[in-house]
Structures are given as structure tokens and as C-alpha cells.
Image (spheres, rainbow, N blue to C red):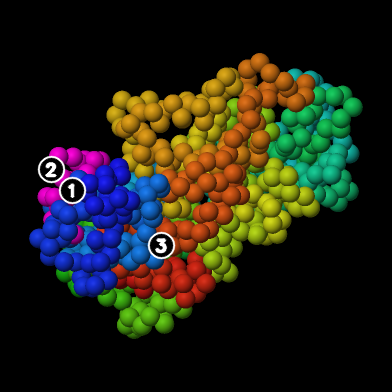
Amino acid sequence: MTKVSPSTGMKTMGLATRLLGILLRVVVFSGTLMAQEELRLLMEQHCYQCHGVEKQKGDLRLDTLEAPSGAGQQSHRWLEVLEVLANGEMPPKKEKQPPAEQRKAVVRQLRERLSEGLVAPIGLRRMNRTEYESTVQDLLGITVGLQELLPEDGEVDGFDNVSDGLGISSILMERYLEAADVAFEAVIRRFAPLEAQTRRMQVMEGRENLDSVAKKKGGVIEVEGALVKFTPGWPPVRIDQVHPIEDGSYRCRVAVWPYQPGERTLAMAVYVGPLFGDGKRRFMGMYDVTGTPENPRVIDFVAELKEGETIHLVPWVYPDHVTWRDKHEKQPGIGVVWAETHGPLNQDFPSEAQKRLFGESESLSMKPYQSHWMRHRKGVELHEVISSDPQGDAQRIIRAFVPRAFRRPVPQEVADPFVALTLNLLAEGRSFEQAVRAGVCAILCSPQFLLINQEEVVDDYAVASRLSYFLWSSLPDEELMRLAEQGKLKDPSVRSLQVERMLKSPKRERFIKNFTGQWLDLREIEFTTPSSKLYPEFDPMLQQSMVRETEGFFRHILDHDLSVMNFVDSDFAVLNERIARHYGIDNVKGHEHSRVVALAPESIRGGLMGQASILKVTANGTTTSPVMRGVWLLENLLDRPSPPPPPGIPAVEPDIRGATSIREQLAKHREEESCARCHRRIDPPGFALECFDPIGGERSWYRSLGEGKRISKREPYTIGPDVVMDGELSEGERFADFQDFRALLLQREEQILRGIAKKLLVYGSGRPMTLADESSVNFVVAQARQKNLGLKSMVQAVVESEMFQRR
């Protein structure tokens, strides 16, 4: 907006200030927005010079604008006015600025007026694939994975559990049917298990010709009866002889010790999976390697193993390996002494899952129906479930299963179609088990099972489901269902106690992983692989530690109900040794468990913005982009989502040869008029984060692959241009470096509170945010202010909000 000429009678006040003044007088003196004609009259006197018949700066014409109303056809124009006022972008920085309280009052009134008369959308949605897997596993008591059988879900407002992104198609229903069939099969144990046995291997047995192996493969020697492996990564140490001969749950134990560890703790990644081929190996954990050859550490864990699968051990001796260039350096390694498996641990036949689904009626039994070939076991016969009263048992099983699956009591007529399907198949000559399978699979693919928030009236059972899908991504447990049956979930104090209980359950890890994985984009941590030439210190152990830090940080804030402003800056971090060394923080020992570490006042690592996981997912693996990081920060912390770039405008690609800085490139990019407005918002926050490289390391200069000075002969990169971090926010505030910028964000408490409240409300309710939900946002923020801005208090407030409680 331009300055108004003196002939208008407004010598110093710009258009935006005059518009703000008009709106303020409307609020203060009348307490309500004046009628459309009266508002137009004031605009005619003060605003039409730039936004009238002759000129429409910014394509905004006020002389035809109706009074503010959320239901009005021109509400989008008022939303533009609201946005620039709320974000401090108008009046322009060179104009006289209204007092802060005055601006807040106008913004508040505009939000209220634009939300009046609006009806929030219904939150009806289907389960996403994560929720489907958790629900079916908890319902049936099985552990088989189902998520990969279903297509990926769409995202809306950053989450994949939001109604607008969860459509239903014929292809999806086919996949649900396939997943339900796999789940039903996992319920039944087809043959009686062998008695639990221990299969043990001394790793050096059968490796007499180790010298030739070492020469061919490299990286292994024998030391004191142990196989010592030096090289990190694949191929692993594979413990073939301990593989189980049938599927089941097994206790696995591995004895290891560190070889030449120096001052650092060595670690080992443990996987389980197929002996050969490209079958998917499953990560079991990262373990510290301690002990001595005489008294090694015994790593102990339980895993679901299939016939022929085994343990794979991968030394994680990073980051030392990138500096092993001189012969005199002692190379650390992992000594593996022995390994064993014991099981199968579950000896029930029939399985507990089968008993849960079918019951334990005397009319039920297991009947052999087919011989089954197994490589290591002979004379095995597969069994099916039979019944001496198939019609009676089938009806009983289906009628008992329907209310559990539908998460509420149901009238008899709701279960009748599923009973009829099952009985009809029996009448057609299908076996008892086949008929029950069809009935159960039909239930697991039915709308009543798949849909959430489908109730016409939000009763106690609906509240139980909303609580469980918010905090557990699964169906309610027995206690929630009992409270719903008793009608006690109408009581806010009971709901509050249940939230406390649920956030102490191990299942709350689903909330931590799913919410942070989407809000903070942690799910994308593997999408890029940093350049080994520019960032040779990066390794899988560091990546694991990155995610652990951020999830542990969120968990600590949640558990202790700490202020959400810790997400901007904190005096602590949650670190293990690998990530601490990456940050240059001393006296943190061990990789296996993270711990709370006090930070120095001048540390750049407090809050989310200094965490390597965030900095990696906002980079492309080779370079950083102020645009990508600026957009991430605006959307995830400041509630200021950026529109997509105009069509035909190419992305800015950083120059890894070091000839041109990204700052210079963006300055040229902003010369495009269509790009300038958004980039004035986006670029400055991104510039502040340029002190962090693509893997979250602190830097004062860019790494380059071009000509230049090297810091040592060992490193393949050269010293590029200096990093420049200073900038000016779109509101006109300047900062010199990252710490200055972070201090400015701490002053935006209201904005950050509202942004986090919206994220929790969208995730918790499963539907997009609209202006009609302003009252819920205000409620959550107000409740948080009464509880020191605590994160757990905000979660409690979300449960009590209108957006969560209504249909």
C-alpha cells in the first residue's frame, strides 16, 4: 500500500492504518460491526484512493466489499485483510503502526465476525491404514503387520487421519478384504508347537579358515574366541545356526564385547530376517556394546521369527571410521562370542487369539486336514477349527464379535446380515471355519467398523472411541468401554482421569510417533541420503539418534506438562552419545538410551529448530534451502502456511560448487513480482537456520565440491562461501543470527500457541480446521494459559473442546 497524497487530508496515515482505525472505532464505540452501508461510507472517505474505482492495489477493491461475514460471498477478501493484520504485514513497516493491543482487538473481532453463522463440517471419516492395523491387532490379539497391504492415505492439513483425505474406493475395499483375510489367518495356529528349545551357536565354530574369509570379505579377525567385525554396515554378522524351525515368538540372546573402543561407547544394530535374499529385515534396536572378552554383555530381546529367519548383527562404530586413514590408528570393532534363540515361547494350541475370537466352547475342536512339509520338522499336519454345532457356534461368534468390532452395543438387527452371511455359507456346504472367516472379514470391511465419528449423537461410546483414536490410534480398551456403559464419560473429571491414564500406557507411543511423525515430518527422515562426499560423518546410527532425540523431547514435555514454548527454545535436550557428539556436547555416554541433558545458556540446540531431525527433513541431503526451512517453520510453528509457488516459476537450486550463495540466488528470485510477497515471509526464517547444515551440524561456511581450501587431506570437500544468517522479518524486525531470531519467535507466544492448538485439534478430531472452529482454538489456548502453557494441558483441553466433542 502506498502513502496517501496530502490532498486527501490524511498527510501521514497510510491506507492500511486508516482501515485499521475504522475497524477499531467500530469495535470500541459500537461493540459490533456497523451495517454494510455505514462501513462503506467510512471506506469511501478514507480508503478508496488505493482500493476504489480508479485503483485496486493488490487486487483489493473495498468500495464493493460487503460487511464482514463468514457466510458472505466476499469472506475471502476479509480473510486477506485478517491475514495481513494478524501477521503484522500491514500497515507497511514505513507507515505509522497501531498499538499492539489495538491490532489484537481488531484481529479478534474480525475472527469472531468471520466465524459467525458458519457450520463446522462433520468429522465422519474412515480409519487410516495405521489405525486399521492397530485396531485389528488389538481387537484380535495378533501381531501380524497389515499396514503395507493398504495404499497410502492422503494428507490434509499435514495429517493422514483427516476426513477430507480419506476417501473410499472399490480398490481400497479389495485391499481391506485382503488385510482382513490375513488377520483372520493369523488368529489360528495351524499345528501344535514343538516344546520350547534353545538353539545356540559359538560364533567362531566352523570358522577355522578365517584368514581367507577376512582376505576376501575384509573387516573380521578372531580375538580370544570371538569374531571381531570392524566394518560398519552390511554385510552383517549373520548367526545362521540359531534360526528357528517354526514360526513363533522367541527369546534371542547375543554375547558381545567392544574391541579397542577408545574413549567412545561402541554400538550395534540388531535386525532379524531371512537368511538369504532380499527379504525385509526388521530393526530390533540399537544396543551399547560393553563388557570384556571374559564377561561380555548379553543383549536380550524377544522377537517374532518365521521359520528360517535369523539374527543379523551390524556394528555401528561410527563416526570414527571416516577418519581411519593412518595405519597407526587403532580401529574399533565388535566382538561377537555366541548367540542363541529359545522358543517358541507361546505354547498354546489353540492360540490365545483363537480362544478370544471363537470362545472355548466344548463344541469346538481342532481337526487335521492336510499334511504340511517343513524343512526341519516331519509329520506335521495342519489343523482347522471345527464345530459339533456349527450353526449355533457361528451365530454366537458373530454376534459376540460385532459389538466389540463396532465399539458399542448394537441392536440385533445390525448383526443379522453378518450372521445371515455366515449361516448361508454353511448351508451351501462351506466348512465351519470358512463360514466364520467370511463373517469376520465382512465385519472388518463394513462401514460400521471402518468409519469413525459416524454417530448421530455423540454419546459415551463415541467419546470412548474419540479418546482412543486420538491417543492410541486404536479402539477403546475394556476400561473405556466399561465407563461408557456406565455413562460416566459425560463427566469432564472422568475424561480428564482417562486422558492421564491413557498417556501413561505404552500405547501412547503411537500418539507420540504418529503425531510428531506428521507434525514435524519425522516420517520423511529416510527420504534423502546425504552426500557421502560432503557429509562423510553421516551414518544410520546418527539418523536413528536424530529421531530418538525429537520423539524423546516431545515425550519429556508431554509427560511433565512443560510449556509448549520449549518447542521454540529450551534449556534442555534429550540426547544419546551419538547425537551429543554430533552437536559437540560432552559427557553424554551411551547410545542405547537417551537422557535429559542441561544446555548452556548460549546453546543453539534448545527447542525444535536446532534438532538434527528437523534440519535433515528440511534439506535435500546435499544442500540446505532457506525456502524449504522457512516454509516448514511458518507452517509448523507459526501457523502461517504458505501458498504454492506460481506456475512456471522454477525452484532455486543451490550451487554446490560454491560459486554463488543461496542468498544471492534468492535475492534475484525475489525480483519476480509474483514471488516477492511470499518470499519476504519465507526467506528470513530460512536464512536464520543457515547456520545448520543438511545433517544438523553447526557451520559458519558452506561445504563445496569446487576448487578451494581443504580443512584436511582426509576430507573430500573444500571450504565454500561464509554463511550469512542475518535478516529482516516481514514485520520489520531485524536479527543478526539464529539466537536473535529464536528470541524474536519467543515474543510470538500467542501465534505459537494457536498454531500448536490447531495441530492438536486437527489430529484429535480428524477433520480440517475452519473459521467455525475459532472458539475451540481460543478455548484450548485459554486453558493452556491457566496451566503454564503445558502440552499435556493442551491435550486435555482438546478433549474438552467443542471441535472434539461435537459430531
Graded by Cα atoms within 10 Å as few (under 14), some (14 to 19) or many (20 or more), the crowding at tag 1 reads some
Graded by Cα atoms within 10 Å as few (under 14), some (14 to 19) or many (20 or more), the crowding at tag 3 reads few
Query: Residue beneath label 3, please?
Result: 100
Asked whether residue 478 appears in the rendered view, the answer is no
Helix, strand or loop at label 1? It is helix
Question: Residue 518 shows which numbered tag?
Answer: none
- Evaluate if marks 1 and 2 touch, with contact meaning CB atoms under 8 Å apart: yes
Q: Give the magenta part as a residue range.
A: 50-68
Query: Residue beneath label 2, please?
Result: 53
**Residue 16: x %, y % from top left:** 29, 51
The reply, left or right, for residue 709 in relation to residue 429 is: right
Question: Residue 48 shows which numbered tag?
Answer: 1
Of the residues under marks 1 and 3, which one precedes in the sequence? 1
Q: How many marks?
A: 3
Of the residues under marks 2 and 3, which one precedes in the sequence? 2
Of residues 740 and 182, which is closer to you in this image? Answer: 740
Of residues 411 and 692, which is closer to you in this image? Answer: 692
